[in-house]
Image (cartoon, helix red, strand yellow):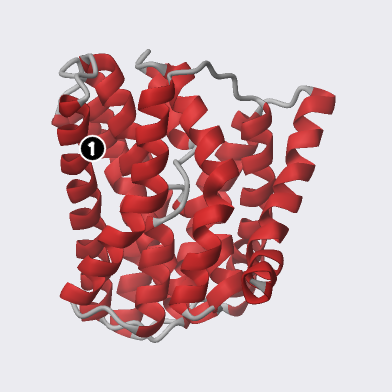
Amino acid sequence: MTNLFTLFANNILPIFLAAGAGFLLSKSFNLNPRPISQVAFYIFIPCLVFNLLTTSNLTGNEILRIILFTIVSVLLLGLLTWALGKLFRFERRLLVAVLLATMFGNAGNFGLSLNLFAFGETALAYASLYFVTITVLTYTLGIVLVSLGSTGLKEALAGLIKVPAIYALAAALLFNALHWKLPLPIDRTVSLLGDATIPVLIILLGIQLGASRWDQRLLALGLTNTVRLVVAPFLAIGLALLMGIRASAMQAVVSQSATPTMVMTTLLATEYDMEPAFVTAAVVTTTLLSPLTMTPLLAFLGA
């Protein structure tokens, strides 16, 4: 029990304390999280992804394996959620909202900081790959899902040109393959901005939670929390073992798979009017309950 408390205090509590500062700031000054989110999305996150991948020793096979793991785990989670939703006879709009809340975890705001605190820089590089992949899936599969046919795959794919982390990933792979180096002033700039990413994301998480509003749908909410926080990590462990993912890579992908619901899903649900109050409720409840599941998971993963 003492070990679990230490794991929580050292690795999870700092995230909640920093996010709490953002939450209080949001409540005190009625902050709009969108401008901060845009700065993080277009500047900080691409710099972090590029810096991590160009300074790590990840091979091409490892990168492809993490990308494949992320895609397969999200699809399996979606299939399971869809089957359970049909079993409980959720109406279509609610079922789509539940799918959105269970399939896409908060691999950015929550997962990157957790991996840095619990497992260090090596795991953080793997975690960043997971994050980039889940971002691509959110802007393709997620958009197609919430649009329910009003937006096609072509339009969703076109939206990927607005995701700078993808360009950072491609640039990092090119630099690694050709053994290129950035000029020192640019390299230091990228490193400086990348180092700022995790603090900004944690504060942003608190601001976004402070701006959230939600209602109650207890059965659907209970299912979402159970699948997102309990089923997802077990599925991730089995899939990682099956795919031969071990050591720091396994720590990264399993912990990323177990994160609470992605805050971005509230924006998608609002944009497409797909039960935004419920999706927001899922973000809030999974975030608040996540220490109960993440702490023993960290112990299992050897944090």
> Would you place residue 202 above or below residue 5 in this image?
above
Question: Quick one: quadrant of the N terminus?
Answer: bottom right
Going by the image, does 168 lie left or right of 109? left
SS at circle 1: helix
**Nearer-the-camera pick, 208 or 40:** 208
Going by the image, does 182 lie left or right of 84? right
On the question of residue 296 being in view, the answer is yes
Q: Residues within 10 Å of mark 1 (few under 14, many from 20)?
A: many
User: What is the x, y in percent for residue 140?
Assistant: 24, 38
Residue 269: quadrant of the picture: top left
User: What is the x, y in percent for residue 174?
Assistant: 31, 73
Q: Residue at x 36, y 26 (%)?
A: 220
On the question of residue 104 being in view, the answer is no
> Would you place residue 57 above or below residue 227 in this image?
below
**Nearer-the-camera pick, 175 or 267:** 267
Number of callouts in the render?
1
Residue 190: quadrant of the picture: bottom right
- Residue under numbered circle 1: 81
Q: Residue at x 39, y 82 (%)?
A: 180
> Would you place residue 12 above or below residue 96 in this image?
below
User: What is the x, y in percent for residue 52?
Assistant: 48, 73
Q: Residue at x 49, y 81 (%)?
A: 302
Residue type, mark 1 in image: Thr
Residue 295: quadrant of the picture: bottom right
